[in-house]
Image (tube, coloured by chain):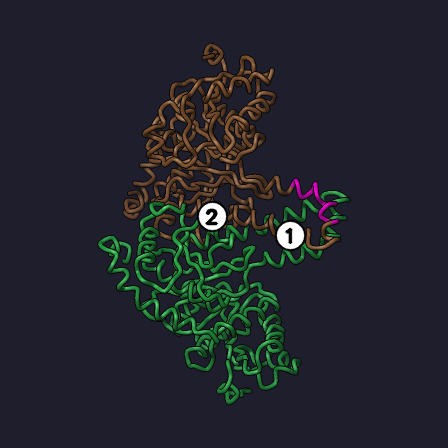
Chain colours: A brown, B green
Amino acid sequence: MRDDSAALTQSLVISIDAMGGDHGPSVVIPAVARALAEAPTQVCFLLHGDEALLAPRVAQHAGAAGRVIIRHAEKVIGMDEKPAQALRRGKGSSMWNAVESVRAGEAAAAVSAGNTGALMAISKLILRMSADLERPALVVGVPTPRGTTTFLDVGANVDCDAERLVEFAIMGEAYHRAAYGKARPTVALLNVGSEEMKGHQEVREANRVLREGGFELDYRGFVEGDDITRGGIDVVVTDGFTGNVALKAMEGVGRFVVGELRGALSSGPLALAGALLARSALGRFREKMNPPPAAPLLGLNGLVLKVHGGATGRDFAQALRVAVDLAQSGFAGEIERNMRRLPAALAETGPTAADGAH
Amino acid sequence: MRDDSAALTQSLVISIDAMGGDHGPSVVIPAVARALAEAPTQVCFLLHGDEALLAPRVAQHAGAAGRVIIRHAEKVIGMDEKPAQALRRGKGSSMWNAVESVRAGEAAAAVSAGNTGALMAISKLILRMSADLERPALVVGVPTPRGTTTFLDVGANVDCDAERLVEFAIMGEAYHRAAYGKARPTVALLNVGSEEMKGHQEVREANRVLREGGFELDYRGFVEGDDITRGGIDVVVTDGFTGNVALKAMEGVGRFVVGELRGALSSGPLALAGALLARSALGRFREKMNPPPAAPLLGLNGLVLKVHGGATGRDFAQALRVAVDLAQSGFAGEIERNMRRLPAALAETGPTAADGAH
């Protein structure tokens, strides 16, 4: 078994579940090679997985020498395994070991395209939650005409009280700053209207706490569903049920649109000729519509990024770039600082705060 | 004041708030003329609004003689008025009188492009809820590659327990049958996954009641956000918070896509030439992406349809066609029949049913 642990000490190390996702090493290794060519030279990749499978593929890339380390793992977590099952039998798997490298301080971030539920459960068990946070939040970047909206929670927390929504606002804002370099991102709560009295108890209470709690946030109140893709607000916060449904609904419209467009553009000789002429413009359009490649699990004592299971080498390489950027930023510390204000902010907002907070 | 109430007795009458919406009579009158040309001759339209404004416009259409009746109304409900305000001062307005015609048995349905909140409040006050239903549900048709998904509630009920979700399933199924002529529509609950244990308490409890309650429904369990536009399920049911956010998120993606597409297709000389050639195909595409023109308020003792405020004459005419079709169908009776099973179904499913039902 080959190892170069000495190389890790002076480097920024990204730990990778090399077996995860629909395509495993056949996507991960080319992505690593691509990321190596672009990342600063102190960035190293620690690959967890079947060494016999990984070593010959890594050897094909000259740039990998001294910057890619393979750590053998016996097991792989299946894409269909239940989280509880993954926790029981996951020890020693490529996913488990990738996350364990972060806990041990060997790596600054872990990246996996494997089973989402298993990755969340394993990450929570190994890294534990940061500050007083209860569960990780799943965050995605949604494309807009002006850039990217940070949208959370997209499915980690089905039941959310006001306190949870405030935590998401804090985590999402710090993440947006770190991921997109914006000094003071704007934050809003998703609701069915922009007036103060709209929405259910939890969202109204979270609105009060965010307005009155003295957080270091540029909080803008309520926004509606179409604001997620409008680009007027940087961070849009909701519970994991609504966020998951909205994200998938938007992905569904994207797929529907591409299908309809294909139909419309091939429904006659002139239309087809038009489509051929417009092909490269449409290619750029489709690229922008692609789902974002990496979703960090926020709220853990350590950085874990989930890459979507069907990711291409290009997607995975982009996720590695995001991991490097986030690992170099201090966003975990910023979350911690705002989280310390939360108990006081909840207490200050009067008797209704107590209802929303538990 | 002109009136031909005798003409109403042997006809199918649709009552119209002729002053509602962003454009009022300038959209409504051409839509009525268009609908007259297509509807069976026994269909008549009863227009409520400013007679001095409406009469000369109606007189321009030869086909209107004997089939369009103008009933003068002094007042108009503003698009920005709060529901409570609309209830206080709405009596005698074109919207109020349009709904009142349904209550009085003069008209089989009322159609308005006015203020949604005001229309719901006024309809509930005048018509009252049917059976044991608590609040109207707002339903829309969402385009899919295979037809239309009936999606509800899209904003009338922010807090929904299991009983409410079951009611939506019953109302939505009967509506889909009436609106699209499908003998046995499939019905599903929106959730964050398809497994039985996914989601919050209310959606799991509603799932149990729908499975075990002996309703005349082809109930298929849980679906996810992207199923709304997939076309595999006819009726997708959710609470008004999630439904409103998801609908607006989908509309936002639609707008984003059209904007991006315009950009992509004009970003170079060849792309522009391509777009010109493909123009008519893209026109058909955009048409399919348009939001549905009419959303019935389900659950009232009488049929009321809300048309979106910015509707064109073509949209409004289509809404009138939908109103005629629904008025001729027996969907209200079908809702009533299934609703009678609800109390027993809730009682049968054991102790957890009681939690979900209140």
Q: Find the residue positioned furthest to the top.
A: A6
Q: Find the residue positioned furthest to the front.
A: A52
Could you tell me which secondary element the residue under label 2 belongs to? helix
User: Residue drawn at (53%, 30%), measured in percent from left and top?
Assistant: A319
The reply to whether discs 1 and 2 touch (Cβ–Cβ < 8 Å) is no
Pointer 2 residue: A246
Could you tell me which secondary element the residue under label 1 belongs to? helix
Report the chain holding disc 2: A
Is B137 above or below relative to A265?
Answer: below
Q: Is residue A281 left or right of residue B244?
A: right
Is B301 above or below relative to B172?
Answer: below
Report the chain holding disc 1: A
Q: Is residue B132 magenta?
A: no
- Asked whether residue A10 is in view, the answer is yes
Whole-angstrom CA distance, mark 1 to mark 2, is 26 Å
Looking at the image, is mark 1 or mark 2 earlier in the sequence?
Answer: 2
Q: Find the residue positioned furthest to the bottom.
A: B6
User: Residue drawn at (51%, 70%), measured in percent from left and top?
Assistant: B112
Marking on residue B315: none
Judged by depth in the image, the label closer to the viewer, 1 or 2, is 1
Task: Residue B96: name its quadrant.
Answer: bottom left
Task: Residue B54: name its quadrant.
Answer: bottom right
Query: Residue B311 or A186: which is nearer the viewer?
Result: B311
Q: Is residue A277 magenta?
A: yes
Query: Residue B148 or A319: which is nearer the viewer?
Result: B148
Pointer 1 residue: A263
Q: Find the residue positioned furthest to the left.
A: B351
Q: Amino acid at mark 1?
A: Gly
Query: 10 Å neighbourhood of mark 1: few (<14), some, or many (≥20)?
Result: some
x then y, percent, for residue B55: 60, 81
Is A98 above or below relative to B289?
Answer: above
Q: Which residues are magenta?
A: A273-284
